[in-house]
């Protein structure tokens, strides 16, 4: 408030000086001189009018600036809240991984940019037994442990998500040949190494993994079907293993 009074006072003084100069000039042109009353009016009128008017103007400008700053802060807070909500909506609440829809959207975006890589479907082994033996709360804890182990294993830049109850998936860009199986084995071993012991009872955790590699002539639904068939081949072969066999899969896609 003090700064407003000072600034408006300076404006009023300037107005008074200008008023005296104008009045003196007008009187001189008419061959007259500015007497005491005229001088007083030339000074007092600007002071009485310009000072409060400029003070009001400066105060309104300050309020407008404060309101604008408040709106900018509110807009920034709203944008941040929207980003948090969007991030939360894209994540699986239990594991923090991308949910199925967001995972597939991320892969579609990669494919739209001409990306290629490996697709892995990862399924927790004997999960029904864990739920039946220990209850769903322990089953959920096992899923969280498995998800954390999966997230630790893939190379940087991989896209990982939970796409079903006990089913996870990973997309590893620019990964082909033997490198695909190396990544899948890293994930399998990472899960196998979990020391899960609910109520002091060891409960081994493992996953089966079906692997498929994107090529230009395969769509996302086709690559999902190939990886899914290989996953079930891993299940039938005894679980806790990786299957990346190409035999007859392209023809069946």
Image (tube, grey):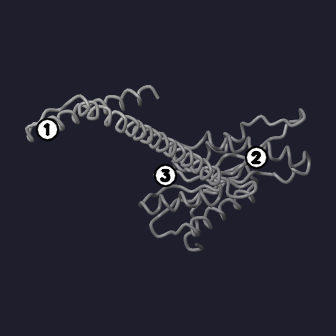
> Judging from the image, what secondary structure is the residue with disc 3 in?
strand
Comparing 62 with 42, the one in front is 42
Q: Quadrant of residue 185?
A: top right
Q: Residue at x 49, y 55 (%)?
A: 117
Q: Are marks 3 and 1 in contact (CB under 8 Å)?
A: no
> Judging from the image, what secondary structure is the residue with disc 2 in?
helix
Q: Earlier in the sequence, mark 2 or mark 1?
A: 1
Q: Residue at x 41, y 29 (%)?
A: 5
Say whether residue 13 is left or right of residue 249: left
Q: CA distance from mark 2 to mark 1?
A: 95 Å
Q: CA distance from mark 3 to mark 1?
A: 88 Å
Q: Residue at x 44, y 25 (%)?
A: 2
Say whether residue 197 is left or right of residue 46: right
Query: Disc number at residue 143?
Result: 2
Residue at the disc numbered 3: 173
Label 1: how many Cα within 10 Å (few below 14, some 14–19, many 20+): some
Q: Quadrant of residue 15?
A: top left
Residue at the disc numbered 1: 27
Comparing 240 with 5, the one in front is 5
> Judging from the image, what secondary structure is the residue with disc 1 in?
helix
């Amino acid at each position: 408030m003090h700064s407003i009074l000072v600034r408006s006072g300076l404006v009023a003084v300037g107005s008074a000086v200008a008023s005296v100069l104008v009045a003196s000039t007008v009187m001189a042109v008419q061959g007259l001189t500015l007497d005491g009353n005229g001088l007083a009016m030339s000074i007092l009128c600007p002071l009485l009018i310009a000072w409060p008017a400029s003070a009001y103007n400066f105060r309104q400008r300050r309020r407008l600036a404060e309101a604008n700053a408040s709106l900018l802060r509110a807009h920034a807070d709203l944008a941040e809240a929207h980003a948090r909500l969007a991030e939360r909506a894209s994540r699986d609440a239990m594991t923090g991984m991308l949910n199925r829809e967001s995972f597939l959207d991320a892969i579609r975006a990669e494919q739209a940019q001409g990306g290629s890589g490996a697709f892995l479907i990862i399924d927790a082994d004997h999960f029904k037994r864990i739920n039946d033996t220990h209850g769903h709360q322990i089953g959920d804890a096992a899923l969280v442990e498995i998800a954390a182990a999966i997230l630790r294993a893939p190379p940087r830049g991989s896209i990982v998500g939970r796409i079903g109850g006990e089913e996870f998936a990973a997309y590893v860009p620019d990964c082909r040949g033997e490198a695909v199986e190396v990544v899948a084995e890293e994930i399998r071993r990472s899960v196998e190494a979990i020391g899960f012991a609910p109520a002091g009872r060891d409960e081994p955790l493992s996953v089966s993994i079906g692997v498929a590699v994107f090529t230009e002539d395969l769509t996302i639904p086709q690559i999902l079907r190939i990886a899914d068939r290989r996953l079930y081949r891993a299940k039938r072969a005894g679980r806790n293993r990786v299957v990346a066999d190409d035999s007859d899969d392209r023809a069946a896609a």
